[in-house]
Image (cartoon, helix red, strand yellow):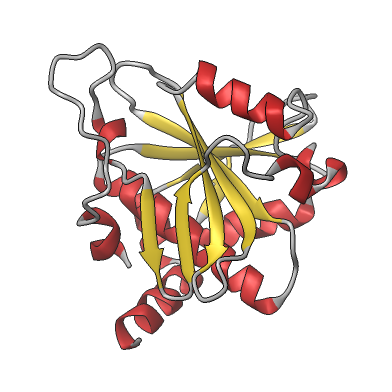
Amino acid sequence: MTTAAANNPDRQNNEEGTPYSSRWHDVPLSFILPQVTVRQVIPGDAVVSSFGSERWRNIFTDIGSDKALDDFLARNSDTCRAYLLLHTDSGEPFGGIFLRRRDPIMCDTVEFHGGAWRDSYMDSLGKFRAAIAVISALLQAGIQVSSRAYRTNSPALRFLEAIGFRQIQRPSSRPWVSLRLSRKRFAASPVVRRLAEASQDS
């Protein structure tokens, strides 16, 4: 899975010296994985409406429609990216991943968000496969990965911690917690190791 992501030819082809040329452009725009296809969101994709308002508010509270998401991504194409997750066999979408880089020049850290709007075993497995592939590509590009989640969003916190994220313990009255992922914890995650082994066997 890691090698496939790193060698994916579908990556941004920016010339050196352009204002936003950085490690960000080494992260592929699509991934073909066992049972899951991950591609960049395009205008017209039903992402917000598929998540539904309650689940979507756990990701973005200030974007309320698919059109608003399309407009946001168009305005922030240098610093934000959204992926659609699809089952490869059926082509049916089931979730999304959202990346936001903190630094528009060096791209030292990217904030990771994502999830699925369906809860079957295959959807959950696909969500993990997709997240691991995208995070592997970020780490291989030398980018640190962080995230945030609402304190009340237990499923998101369990998902992130299963991959290896750990909460940054800071006194705060904010409704969310910050999380950070180290390369060592990611590699040691039982979920990451199990799916990597399954990918090699398939």
Q: Quadrant of the C terminus?
A: bottom left
Residue 150 shows up from this direction: no
Q: Residue at x 55, y 62 (%)?
A: 86
Residue 169: % across, % down: 63, 37
Labels in figure, total: 0
Q: Give whichever of 123, 182 is nearer the camera.
A: 123
Relative to residue 10, is residue 178 drawn left or right?
A: right
Relative to residue 59, is residue 175 drawn left or right?
A: right
Check the image and report above or below for 201 versus 104.
below
Check the image and report above or below for 33 versus 141.
below
Residue 173: % across, % down: 80, 24
Q: Residue at x 20, y 33 (%)?
A: 13
Q: Residue at x 28, y 17 (%)?
A: 20
Relative to residue 114, is residue 5 drawn left or right?
A: left
Q: Give whichever of 149, 71 is nearer the camera.
A: 71
Q: Quadrant of the N terminus?
A: bottom left
Q: Give whichever of 135, 80 is nearer the camera.
A: 80
Residue 78: % across, % down: 40, 21
Relative to residue 5, is residue 71 drawn left or right?
A: right
Residue 163: % across, % down: 51, 60
Name, please, the residue furthest toward the right. Answer: 54
Name, please, the residue furthest toward the bottom. Answer: 201
Name, please, the residue furthest toward the left. Answer: 16
Q: Residue at x 73, y 40 (%)?
A: 48
Check the image and report above or below for 14 versus 193.
above
Q: Give whichever of 14, 99 is nearer the camera.
A: 14
Name, please, the residue furthest toward the front. Answer: 44
Residue 90 shows up from this direction: yes
